[in-house]
Amino acid sequence: VEFTSLATECKAVNIGQGFPDTPVPGFVSEMLEDVAKHPERTDWHQYSRGFGHPRLTNALAKLYSNTLGVAVDAQQNVLVTVGAYLSLYYSFMGWLNEGDEVIVLDPAFDCYIPQIRMAGGVPVPVVLTLPLEPRTSKDYTLNAKAIEEKISKRTKMIVLNNPHNPTGKLFTQEELEKIADIVIRHNLLVVADEVYEWHVYGDKKMIRFASLPDMYKRTITIGSAGKAFSVTGWKLGWSIAPTELEPLRRIHQNCVFTCPTPIQQAVAEAFEKELDVIGANPTESYLMKGITSELIQQRDRMASILRSAGMKPIIPDSDGPFKVTDGNNDPLDFHFVRWMCREKKLAMIPNSAFYTGPNKQNNDHFIRVCFFKAINMAENATETDLKTFKDFLTQYNAVAEQCFTSCITDFTTRIVSNSEEQCCSNCLDKFLKMTQRMSLRFQEHQMIQNEAQGPLGLK
């Protein structure tokens, strides 16, 4: 919320938030336009079935019967919600009792933790590990043993976000099978947030968790029309599950009751069109090929922009923002992003906002950048703000070297641990990796908070 407001306040170019600013796919907007042109179709404009407009639930049942490899019943196994947010909220509120523990992979989409807590649950983070020099999102790895170590008698649920937000990681068959094994042995429920299921690049394969053996009966699969058709403002999502939907339905019936019928009708027609195209010629499908080909071009363009600014992007294998390795008591990336927005009119998102507790400080040397933006927006940002930013990085390195020298002087007056010695030896090349230890030095040099003078710009 803070960085959305800050971007608006500063009138900044917003390359942080994960929404497109390109035109909506023509065939999708035409569906809604057609609905609006038929006022006589009262079934398109009045209350529809509370658990989902029949035409949409039928289309979703057909789609997921194919992708999950099970028979999905349109009446019993599909619940349409106001965005995937509510599907997540219903899952937690419907299934968690006070004190129930939920495994959450860290970093995580920022609504998981508060929603779990609102339901009385206890989030238990398990960190995805990352090497010192990451290059792509597959460098984020899942340690199944780390999950095992966090499971207790109170553990009820695992939240699995695949493709993963905010890293863009696509979990492998092996990783998913390890999770499935844990789920069976500990009798757990899985909330599978798969809203980016259609945003998978190149020859990578999206494996839906509920399609694994014996997992459909343990999984609530969550999808999004906003992500599927690039219409995030339509706020339409769904849950696919067997009997586990019952608690979700009770909450929905007494909270929202029903979703906007015209939107459901338009999305239903869009899916019907896609199902026909996929059946006849998948290469012509927007979901199967169209959106990913567009995203790959924009991803590669943004990578080039960031590299030209002296940054090191972590390239996602599926949809998810870039992470870029540069970068009071807030983590370093919070200070940096605020400065970029105020001084350079370029809005990004701090990576540590997606981590919990002490994990924030260990992951504050990344920033998040979204590449699903208009070409001219990205190019304009490159020509103005990022060109200036490249000059800033040069200055930043120079001051970092000065800080390094100060640290060496400090270390000569006391016993230095092996880890500190090793860190110092690599400081000039990898100074951001010792940011936490040097943060006080950075503040002394007014690297972060000084808005009046120095390498961070002039008022």
Image (tube, helix red, strand yellow):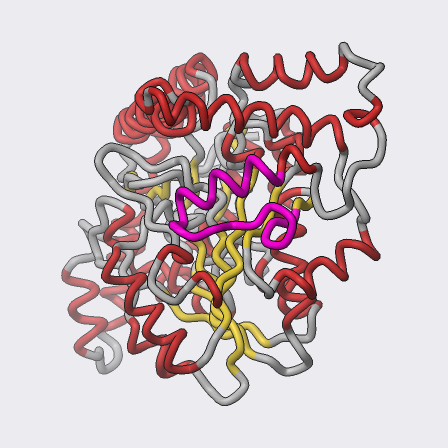
Q: Residue at x 37, y 26 (%)?
A: 279
Residue 297 lies in magenta, yes or no? no
Toward the viewer: 300 or 26?
Answer: 26
Coordinates of residue 15 in the picture (x, y in percent): 48, 30
Q: Is residue 205 left or right of residue 259?
A: left
Choose top left, top right, bottom left or bottom right for residue 175: bottom left
Choose top left, top right, bottom left or bottom right for residue 285: top left
In the image, residue 273 above or below residue 128: above
In which quadrant of the rendered image does the C terminus lie?
A: top right
Coordinates of residue 278 in the picture (x, y in percent): 38, 26
Question: Is any part of residue 446 visible from this angle?
Answer: no
Q: Is residue 46 left or right of residue 115?
A: right
Toward the viewer: 361 or 414?
Answer: 361
Toward the viewer: 85 or 192?
Answer: 192
Residue 72 lies in magenta, yes or no? yes
Coordinates of residue 84 in the picture (x, y in percent): 60, 47
Considering every residue shown, the one lying at the far bottom of the view is 153
Question: Is any part of residue 317 visible from this angle?
Answer: yes
Q: Residue at x 34, y 40 (%)?
A: 318
Specify start and end residues of the magenta stretch as a single range: 57-79
Coordinates of residue 223 in the picture (x, y in percent): 53, 45
In the image, residue 246 above or below residue 110: below
Q: Residue at x 81, y 48 (%)?
A: 257
In which quadrant of the rendered image does the N terminus lie?
A: top right
Q: Residue at x 40, y 70 (%)?
A: 126
In the image, residue 449 above or below residue 342: below
Considering every residue shown, the one lying at the far top of the view is 37
Toward the viewer: 417 or 18?
Answer: 18
